[in-house]
Image: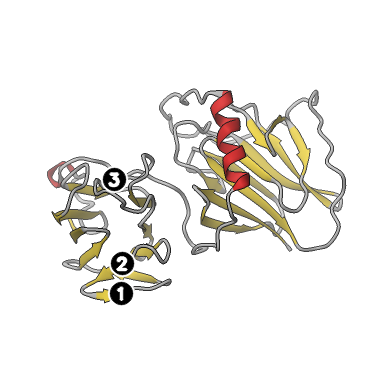
Amino acid sequence: MAKLYLKFEDRTIREVLISGGTITIGRQPDNTLQIDNPAVSGHHARVYSEGDHYVLEDTESFNGTYVNNQRIRKLVLRDGDKALIGKHTIEFRDQRGAQPQAVDWSGAGQAQVVKAKAPQLARTAVLDTAKAKEMLAAQMAAAASAGGPGVVQRMGIAESRPAAAAVPGACQTIGILTIVEGRTDQQSYVLTSTLTVIGRSKMAGIRLKKWFAPRVAASIYRAEDGYFIFASGNRAKVRVNDTVIGSGRQQLNAGDVIAMAGIKAVFNFC
């Protein structure tokens, strides 16, 4: 059984079982594994089975795909390989047994994939190659994450705009988080992304300003049936209405009070 683990700063934010077909990776919402980051191309890479092994192929991305500190075009994956795409890491795990030797078709042409017209995105941000290698080396040296909830789809950034700017007619489904105590970069957040990260990290959608705050304290996941909050580790205790949520997830309801890492916030719908 082969799986892909999407990670950000050594924390697993999504787990994907490769059960057949092609796993597409990129910033566009029509990808199987969407990564909402400006350094990721709209259709960045793909993973598919070929014979008795799995192949990672870069689909002419702007910033490239790196595996084990090397830029690749097409590569047979081995258990434990880590691919750097933008600022995220995708780890490949295959429990079937021995893996074949990696083969890199650096000169191979890219397969043509016919897709419906996708929505226009902002231009992909340029990610410095040296910085990409530095990030990958640091992530490979770090301890493997204990694993996170498998239902989280992507890293998103909460829109830092007032609640009044929400789209009319969407108020029953769009969540708002209002900070009532503590220091953050904004007072109110409209939670339109699939995943909003809360922490001190520069990539967090809700940035904590307190000294020694966790880099990633919690994540709020927007699903079809509502919003859910996850704690991101033992360092950050997350309370919803004075109850610690532990390692599981907690669905958020209008009026819920969330407390963590020196802040208190109220969740509501616009």
Q: Nearer the viewer, residue 260 or 12?
A: 260
Residue 12 point in image, percent of width and height:
52, 56
Secondary structure beneath dot 1 equals: strand
Quarter of the image holding residue 264?
A: bottom left
Quarter of the image holding residue 262?
A: bottom left
Q: Residues within 10 Å of mark 2 (few under 14, many from 20)?
A: many
> What amino acid is found at the position of numbered circle 1 in the picture?
Val
Quarter of the image holding residue 226?
A: bottom left
Residue on which the image places disc 2: 238
Q: Nearer the viewer, residue 57 or 6?
A: 6
Q: Is residue 99 left or right of residue 203?
A: right
Would you say residue 164 is visible in this rendering?
A: yes
| Residue 207 circle label | 3
Please give the name of the residue rendered at 12% of the width and 44% of the height, measured from the top-left corner.
Answer: 164
Residue on which the image places disc 1: 244
Would you say residue 62 is visible in this rendering?
A: no
Secondary structure beneath dot 2 equals: loop
Residue 61 point in image, percent of width and height:
60, 28
**Circles 1, 2 touching at the beta carbon (< 8 Å):** yes
Mark 1 → mark 2, Cα distance in angstroms: 6 Å
